[in-house]
Image (cartoon, coloured by chain):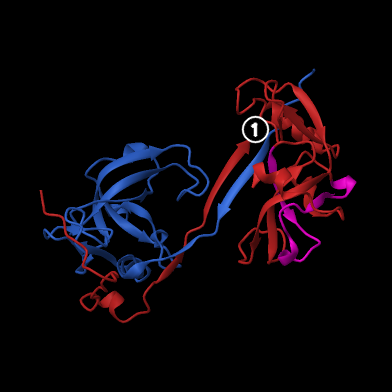
Amino acid sequence: MTEPEILSAPLVLEFPFSRTTGPVIGAFLTGLREKTVVGMRGADGRVICPAVEYDPETGAPLTELVELSDTGTVTSWTWVSQPRQGQPFARPFAFALVQIDGADTAMAHAVDVADATEMSTGMRVRARWAVEREGLITDIECFEPELAR
Amino acid sequence: MSEIAELPEGLWYQPDVDTSQIPAIAGVEAVRSIRVPARVEYLYTPGRAPTRFLRALAEKRIMGERCPVTGKVYVPPRGVSPVVGLPTEEQVELGHRGTVTTFCVVDIAFTGQVTETPFVSALVLIDGADITLHGLIQGIPPADVRPGMRVEAVWVPDDELSTSFENIRWWRPSGEPDVDPDTIREYL
């Protein structure tokens, strides 16, 4: 029996999820829509950003929101030389952990610089806000070096 | 190490948060729901046996493969008997009719469905096969579908045939009498 040429075809799985945010994530996303970064005070007094619903150590429900700035410090980063579809930029960029000023934890986001040589741990960054904001993490388009403007 | 907090007894819901200290979000409509579509793109390579199956489907034929030990016919074939682990080398052409074994009536609409609700999603034991295959049932009110019902494949028009399982649009009643439930007991 001769084997036919093996078939191959694109297969796309797509799920149109929507989810309710709850009061805490909702407050964080509402903040982004209003160009304000919101964190949550944990049971031990630390500020966690993005805001979380329960204390990571004790599991206690948290309710004390904290307004933060839109600047921060890169604590870790990686260079994306070949971006994939759906990522923040079609051009090379960095994914970084950014510790927002006033927060004790870091959040993942993109940093827009031209080249990896412009990235460093400890560098100061500022949020670049999207013009159209609707309450999503992408309301922060990316972070950029603080001295860029 | 901190002590782990306990949830209170009874009905529990997340406590509301106080936004009054944050002017930017205190007086505005809060975000309550977000759309987070998920999408993954694959390049699907079915392998040798499913390729044989799909190429036969493009010729409007349904091909299964037989286990060399048990004699059972599997469709769609995976090239290996799932019971004994040996290659299924014998090709078996199956009929275009079958028997509904189990089914469910889908009443709730969802994105991507191919027919209007309510519709019936069923497992069909194709004549000559020893395993059921998933298909839609049309041409009969959902409430009248039953295990043991005989159905026949409804194919797409010949000029639309391709190497796709979607060649079989759905199954409809063939008009034959129901089979004795005992004959499909193994599949219920």
Q: Residue at x 29, y 71 (%)?
A: B11
Find chain B in the image and tell me its colour. Answer: red
Amino acid on which disc 1 is placed: Thr
Q: Furthest residue to the bottom? A: B27
Mark 1 surroundings within 10 Å by alpha-carbon count, few (fewer than 14), some (14 through 19), many (20 or more): some
Magenta residues, start to end: B131-160
| Residue at the farthest right position | B158
Residue sitting nearer the eye, A38 or B35: B35
Q: Which chain is blue?
A: A
x and y percent of residue A71 in the render?
25, 58
Tell me the quarter of the picture where residue B52 sits. top right
Q: Which of B140 and B184 is in front in this view?
A: B184
Q: Does the magenta stretch include residue B79?
A: no
Q: Mark 1 points at which residue?
A: B45
Could you tell me which chain the residue with mark 1 belongs to?
A: B
Would residue A133 be visible to someone looking at this image? no
Q: Please say whether residue B148 is one of the residues in the magenta stretch.
A: yes
Report x, y in % for residue A136: 41, 63
**Of the pair A80 and B91, the residue shown nearer to us:** B91
- Relative side of B95 to B142, left or right: right
Q: What element carries label 1?
A: loop
Residue B110 location, x and y as percent? 61, 62
- Left-right relation of B46 to A86: right
Is residue B17 placed above or below B49 in the rendered structure?
below
